[in-house]
Amino acid sequence: MIYKIRLDSIKLFGYHGVQQHEKDYGQEFLIDCHLDVEAGSEDTIDSTVSYALVADEIERVATKQRFDLIETLAQECLSAVLELDPRIIRTTITVHKPNAPLSQSFGDVSVTVSGARGD
């Protein structure tokens, strides 16, 4: 059975960006992770993928490393999540940068990357 698991708007603080003030002071990022999981039908955590572990892994990547591009952050999160558990078939990661350094008024800046096991 294939399940879709969604973690939306994981709120993290990181030091990602090309401008020096982003590297020095950091900012908030929101990360969405959507998973396709091949899981069993038993009513136990062992029959699926723990979304808590997925969130922990995304937090580890986003807070322990620094990237110039949110594209790279998204790709690194994707790779780390796909490696977590062989039952994860496909993942989509979206990194939102709500405080991106733009002079225009905007609602959101985001990058999305998708990948499957074996890509």
Image (cartoon, rainbow, N blue to C red):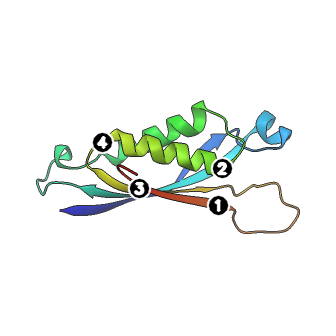
The answer to whether marks 2 and 1 mark residues whose Cβ atoms lie closer than 8 Å is yes
Mark 3 or mark 4, earlier in chain: 4
Where 66 falls versus 109 (above or below)? above
Tell me which amino acid carries mark 1.
Answer: Ser
Residue at the farthest left position: 42
Label 2, secondary structure: give it: helix
Q: Which residue is mark 4?
A: 85
Distance of label 3 from label 1 (alpha carbons): 16 Å
The disc placed on residue 28 is: none
Task: Please state which amino acid type lies under the numbered disc 3.
Answer: Thr
Q: Which residue is mark 1?
A: 110
Q: CA distance from mark 2 to mark 1?
A: 8 Å
Residue at figure coordinates x 27%, y 44% from the top left: 86
Residue 100 image offset from top left, x and y in percent: 76, 55
Which numbered tag is attached to residue 91? 3
Distance of label 2 from label 3 (alpha carbons): 17 Å
- Tell which circle, 1 or 4, labels the residue nearer the N-terminal end: 4
Comes first in the chain, label 2 or label 3: 2
Q: Who's the residue at 51% across and 34% down the image?
A: 60
Tell me where residue 43 appears, x and y as whole percent. 13, 53
Q: Which residue is at 77% across, 36% downward?
A: 23
Q: Which residue is mark 2?
A: 70
How far is disc 3 from disc 4 in space, using C-alphas? 12 Å
Element type at mark 3? strand
Q: Are marks 3 and 1 in contact (CB under 8 Å)?
A: no
Circle nearer the N terminus (3, 1): 3
- Say which label, 2 or 1, has the lower sequence index: 2
Spatial CA span between label 1 and label 4 = 26 Å
